[in-house]
Image: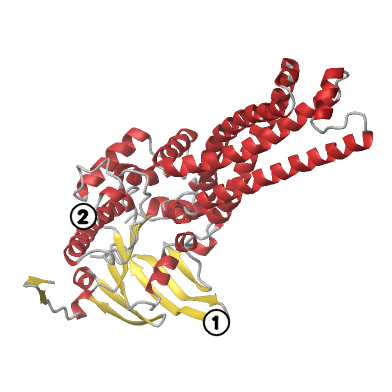
Amino acid sequence: MERIFDERRRGIRHKVVLPWRRTLEVCWSNIRHRMGRCVLSFVCIAVAVAFLTSATTYQLIISDLLHSADVHTQAVLERAGMFVNDEEAVRRQHDQRLWLMALSAFLCLVGISNTILMSVTERYREIGTLKCLGALDTFVVRLFLVESVFVGVLASFAGAVAGYGLGLVQAGAALEFPLLSAGACFRVLGLVVPGAVTLGTVLTMLAAAYPTYVAARMKPVEAMRTEV
Amino acid sequence: MADMREIVRVQEVRKSYVMGAETVHALRGITLIIYGGEYISIMGPSGSGKSTLFNMIGGLDKPTSGEVYIDDVDIAQLEPYELAWLRCRKIGYIFQTFNLIPVMTALENITLPMVFAGLDADSARDKGAELLKLVGLGERLNHRPAQMSGGQQQRVAIARALANDPAIILADEPTGNLDLKTGREIIGLLKQLKEERGVTTITATHDMKMLDVSDRVIWITDGMVGKIQQREELEIKVGTIDGREV
């Protein structure tokens, strides 16, 4: 009978592999067959990002208009309760806007973390099984990260675009739609959408990385025993 | 029969779990040797520690003290990639709860260990289809676990365990979730694989039907080896239920 280990256990390091092509195939298959769960994660991430984006878009548009010297714009702003000529009030409103953006970023973080944490932890048993079949910790982390990046990018993009549109509508409704110049809108678009997509994707990745890393480091038997 | 080369050696293995304020001693110093090509049943009631021992032998958990040697190598000393290689290429696991990946088809489940072993997609597909045929599910390539019965899922799990031609098959209560007839079929299949492929088969079970096919039976009581019996020493009495032999 053949021996399991040869004398020096040579070449073993390169004998357990997960090629990138197969990683993508497995991830795509997982997404396709867990469509219900993925749609739920997608919606949660998109809503969180849309909330952040709409708040940010609204605030940036207002900030932009506050710098305008146009008398009509100033009149509209004052009518909407924004004190153009009171520096103290402008600073106070600026702080409030920052606070609102920070709060929406925090809600975005909590929303995404919760969604992704749940979708990873409910698969601990699967992670244990993968390890029994010979997956290295890095394979498990890679499989789950690629999947989360895929969902994260798409959902963040959808959320950012929707949020941007909502932010514009909100600003236009609060003031006057003709005040929203194409230049300002594009400037804000270029700032907000890439930022929100990056933030949403990074948050999704971080939220997925932590529980996956924890599960991948567990002994297989512990991962398989974990009930969520 | 066995070629009398040591393939697994368990040396004074102890395992304790801390549960709240209490320490549970699941294994209390187990020593045993398993030879290549043997069919071993680790028998014992629930809570006796047989599944814990199974996990130790399979490198799925680490002992609190003591060593498990596979082919004279202490598996606690293996690097993570060596342990992954051992699980991937040399040991095939079968679980009571089947543990198939629910979103994958039977064929995808079977070919997954082959992916980790670096087999190309076409060869993996061919080999997977062949293994499914071997376990009697040649027509169920594209069925998902939820579309199969318990017995069929366990057959897929057995085919998956054989994916990379392992030297050892470890089965934890393989018939635990199956009815009598299906359980017998699974035992028959394991016996057939052992005979045809010379795979060392180690099962942790409390299914007495398993006695009939075992070369040796290791009785575990209270985390210790109660006795080890050779096949010839066993008094197997065949009974009937509903007029059928069991």
Relative to the observer, which residue lies in front, A207 or A71? A71
- SS for dot 1: strand
Q: Measured from the top left, where is residue A124 in percent x and y?
A: 48, 55
Res B33 seen here: yes
Q: Residue furthest left?
A: B243
The CA span between labels 1 and 2 is 46 Å
* Residue type at the position of mark 1: Glu
Relative to the observer, which residue lies in front, A220 or B213? A220
Mark 1 or mark 2: which comes first in sequence?
Answer: 1
* Residue type at the position of mark 2: Glu
Host chain of mark 2: B
Relative to the observer, which residue lies in front, B180 or B79? B180
Q: Mark 1 — residue?
A: B22
What residue is rendered at 22% in x and 60% in y? B186
As drawn, is B196 to the left or to the right of B58? left
What residue is rendered at 30% in x and 61% in y? B200
